[in-house]
């Protein structure tokens, strides 16, 4: 925005306000779809109709489906009145945007979306839940992109701007995704590499295999997070610091809350907090597998969950004030949210079905 402001010889704040009013999205240059009929193909259709050819014959000449030719002629005047130039311009005009927002005249749908946003559901979760709840009613089918645009482009005048505060990022405008690479993995002896993990863990076929990590706050505060790979069920454990003794004790205590059949392995990042992993394995009979250096994607379910948890525990805040009761409440709320990877079923329901 500063570069744009310098180029326009204006202040950055003015550029920011303009982008906020537009929703922070730069509209793409308008272009024709490569899948649609070209002007040359429409002229071939027009000549074929003038010669009295059938739709099937014309379709073979331009290498298109007969139904494509039939619909093209039908929507642009029929056999008698079809003209290539007029049909081409009419198609371009019909594709003009913007059009009336899908949510503009559906008060009940807007009310349902606003309610779920206030429960801190993401637009994608809301979209998937609506399709499951109303599978045969397309009036209640709306994409997550439509919800985002309606939130950020206030000119649509449907969803209140204040609902943005219930989104996980709470951005004032939409931005591109940015990522950072963690460096400096702790050196741990006698580690078992993730490459030695059984194939049954990798394909998520059976429940009981967990991924774990710490989310870090200020003043050396942290929270231990655990995610079950098959159901994406979340468990949180309060730890007073990230020393290996404290973390291992918390993980042992957390493992005792589940039956042996539902805690078969643990995959962890190469943080020094698990330097004493052997003590955890001896106490619980649960093997620990470690990711490769600088490869957090190898425990992707846990990484994704940690990002969701930042909505409740923002970066740069002290995490020591959160009790175990509050952590259990947050975990329960996450477990009752529908997940796209589970076909919009909740982790709690999915985990219960696995147990049954």
Image (cartoon, rainbow, N blue to C red):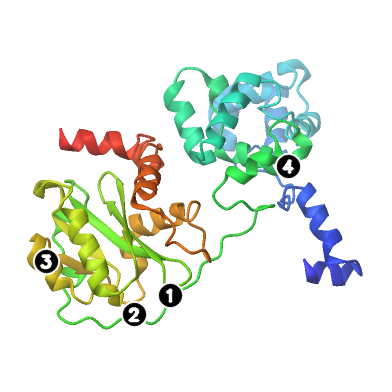
Q: Earlier in the sequence, mark 4 or mark 3?
A: 4
Separation of disc 3 and disc 2 at Cα? 21 Å
Which mark lies nearer to you, 3 or 2? 3
Residue at numbered disc 4: 153
Residue 48 placed where, x, y %? 67, 27
Q: Which mark is residue 182?
A: 1
Residue 51 placed where, x, y %? 70, 23
Q: Nearer the viewer, residue 147 or 92?
A: 147
Q: Are marks 2 and 1 in contact (CB under 8 Å)?
A: yes
Q: Earlier in the sequence, mark 3 or mark 1?
A: 1
Q: Are marks 3 and 2 in contact (CB under 8 Å)?
A: no
Q: Is residue 165 above or below residue 283?
A: above
Q: Which quarter of the image is occupied by the N terminus?
A: bottom right
Does residue 327 appear anywhere in the picture?
yes
Residue at numbered disc 2: 185
Q: Which residue shows up at 29% across the image and 45% down it?
A: 233
Q: Are marks 1 and 4 in contact (CB under 8 Å)?
A: no
SS for callout 4: loop
State left or right for residue 224 relative to residue 25: left
Q: Which residue shows up at 34% across the image and 51% down it?
A: 324
Which mark lies nearer to you, 3 or 1? 3
Q: Quadrant of residue 216?
A: bottom left
Residue 352 placed where, x, y %? 22, 35
Q: Earlier in the sequence, mark 3 or mark 2?
A: 2
Q: Earlier in the sequence, mark 1 or mark 4?
A: 4
Neighbour class for label 2 at 10 Å: few (<14), some, many (≥20)? Answer: few
Residue at numbered disc 3: 281
Q: Are marks 4 and 3 in contact (CB under 8 Å)?
A: no
């Amino acid at each position: 925005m500063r570069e744009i402001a310098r180029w326009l010889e204006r202040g950055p704040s003015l550029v920011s306000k303009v982008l906020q009013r537009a929703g922070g999205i730069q509209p793409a240059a308008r272009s024709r779809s490569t899948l649609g009929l070209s002007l040359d193909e429409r002229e071939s259709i027009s000549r074929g109709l003038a010669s009295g050819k059938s739709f099937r014959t014309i379709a073979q000449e331009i290498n298109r489906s007969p139904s494509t030719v039939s619909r093209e002629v039908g929507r642009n005047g029929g056999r008698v009145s079809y003209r290539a130039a007029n049909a081409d311009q009419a198609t371009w005009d019909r594709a003009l945007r913007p059009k009336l927002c899908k949510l503009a005249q559906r008060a009940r749908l807007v009310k349902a979306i606003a309610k779920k946003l206030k429960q801190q559901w993401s637009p994608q979760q809301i979209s998937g839940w609506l399709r499951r709840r109303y599978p045969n009613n397309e009036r209640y089918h709306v994409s997550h992109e439509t919800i985002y645009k309606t939130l950020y482009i206030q000119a649509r005048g449907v969803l209140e701007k204040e609902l943005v505060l219930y989104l996980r990022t709470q951005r004032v405008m939409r931005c591109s995704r940015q990522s950072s690479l963690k460096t400096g993995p702790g050196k741990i002896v006698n580690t078992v590499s993730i490459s030695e993990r059984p194939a049954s863990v990798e394909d998520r076929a059976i429940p009981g295999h967990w991924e774990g990590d710490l989310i870090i706050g200020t003043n050396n505060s942290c929270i231990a997070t655990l995610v079950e790979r098959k159901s994406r069920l979340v468990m949180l454990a309060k730890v007073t610091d990230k020393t290996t003794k404290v973390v291992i004790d918390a993980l042992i205590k957390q493992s005792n809350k589940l039956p042996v059949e539902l805690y078969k392995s643990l995959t962890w990042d190469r943080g020094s907090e698990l330097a004493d992993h052997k003590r955890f394995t001896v106490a619980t009979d649960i093997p620990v597998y470690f990711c490769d250096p600088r490869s957090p994607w190898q425990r992707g379910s846990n990484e994704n969950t940690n990002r969701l948890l930042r909505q409740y525990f923002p970066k740069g805040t002290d995490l020591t004030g959160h009790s175990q009761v509050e952590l259990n409440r947050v975990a329960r709320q996450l477990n009752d949210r529908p997940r796209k990877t589970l076909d919009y079923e909740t982790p709690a329901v999915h985990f219960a079905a696995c147990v049954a």
